[in-house]
Amino acid sequence: MASLIETAKVEMARVIGRLSRRYSYLGDETAIVTTRAGMRLLVDTRDCSLTPALAAIGCWEPHIERALIRLLERGQRIIEVGANMGYHTLTMARAVGRTGQIDAFEPNPRLYQLLTDSIFKNGLQDIVTTHRSAAVDKAGPVKFQFHPRYFGGGNVVVPGYEDPTNLHIDVPGVRLDDVLGAGPPVDLLRMDAEGCEPLALQGAEELVRGSPRLRIMMEFSPIMMRPRVDVPAFAARLATFGFKAWRVKSSGSLAGIAMTDLPKLAHCDIVLSRDVPPGAL
C-alpha cells in the first residue's frame, strides 16, 4: 500500500509540474498559458469556454488548427475576423513566418488587449497587425454583445437577436474593403464571428474579387446567420465568386459539400476555395 501511495504522489507531482509550466496566474483575472506548440498566450481566467482547455491541455479546436497548418504557406497574407484571445492567430503567424502578414480583427476590448499582448510576448508584432473593430457590411459604430463568462460567443447585435444576459457595448464597425482593399491579394480569410460572417463578407467583396487564390475558412452556422442574412441567398452569392465548399472534419481533413447544401448544415466549420485545397478528401 505504501508503495502505491508513493507512486501516486510521484505521478501527482509530475502532473502538477507539467501544469505549472503550462499555466501561470498573473493577477487581475489574467493568466499566461503555454500552448502545445510552445507559444505563450494570455487568457482571461473568468472565461469558461476557451481558457479551461488552454490551461489543461494547451490546445483549442485542434481540427481547425490541423486544417490551418495544411492550408497555409510561408509568406502568405491573412485576414482574421474574430481573433478572440489569439490562439489561432499564433498558429497562423507561425505558419506564414516572417515574410507573411496577418491582419486580426477583434472588437471585444478585453480580448483585444489579451490578443495584442500575446502578439508582443511572442515577438510577432512585425507579422500581425491587430484591429479593435468589428468587420461588417457598413462602416460606423455597431452594438456588440458578449457574455462575461463565455468570451467565445461575442457578436454584433441585430434587431431581434439581443440577449439580455449579455453585456452590451458600442464598438467601431469597419468594411474590410475600406481598411485593406488597397493592399495585395489575400490568401486566407479566417472568420469566427458567431453568425456575423456574412456581414464581414458583404464588406469585403472587392478583396474577394481581387484575390484569385483566396481561401475562406469560416464557422458556418445557419441558425446564427438567419437573423442577419438570407442563408440560401448568401450561399448562392458565394457560388457566383467561383467558390466550392468543404466541411472541416474532426481530423482536420476536408470533406466536399455542394454549395446548395450549405443552408442545411448543422453548426460546423467550412473551407471555401476556387481550387481543391490541401487536405481535401
Image (cartoon, rainbow, N blue to C red):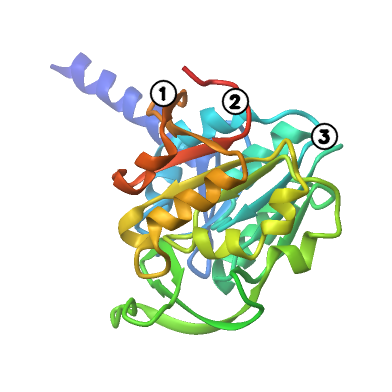
User: Which sits earlier in the primary sequence, circle 2 or circle 3?
Assistant: 3
Q: Left of 89 or right of it: where is 178? A: right
Q: Left of 140 or right of it: where is 250? A: left
Of helix, strand and loop, which one carries label 2? loop
Q: Percent from the top left, x then y, of residue 122?
A: 73, 45
Q: Residue at x 29, y 79 (%)?
A: 165
Q: Residue at x 46, y 23 (%)?
A: 253
- Within 10 Å of disc 2 (Cα), the crowding (few <14, some 14-19, many 20+) is some
- Disc 2 marks which residue? 277
Of helix, strand and loop, which one carries label 3? loop
Judge by depth and name the residue closer to the eye, 128 or 213.
Answer: 213
User: Which sits earlier in the primary sequence, circle 3 or circle 1?
Assistant: 3
Q: From this view, report whether residue 90 is shown above or below residue 200.
A: above
- Regarding residue 33, the answer to whether it shows in the image is no
- Disc 1 marks which residue? 251
Q: Residue at x 34, y 58 (%)?
A: 48
Judge by depth and name the residue closer to the eye, 160 or 170.
Answer: 160
Callout count: 3
Of helix, strand and loop, which one carries label 1? loop
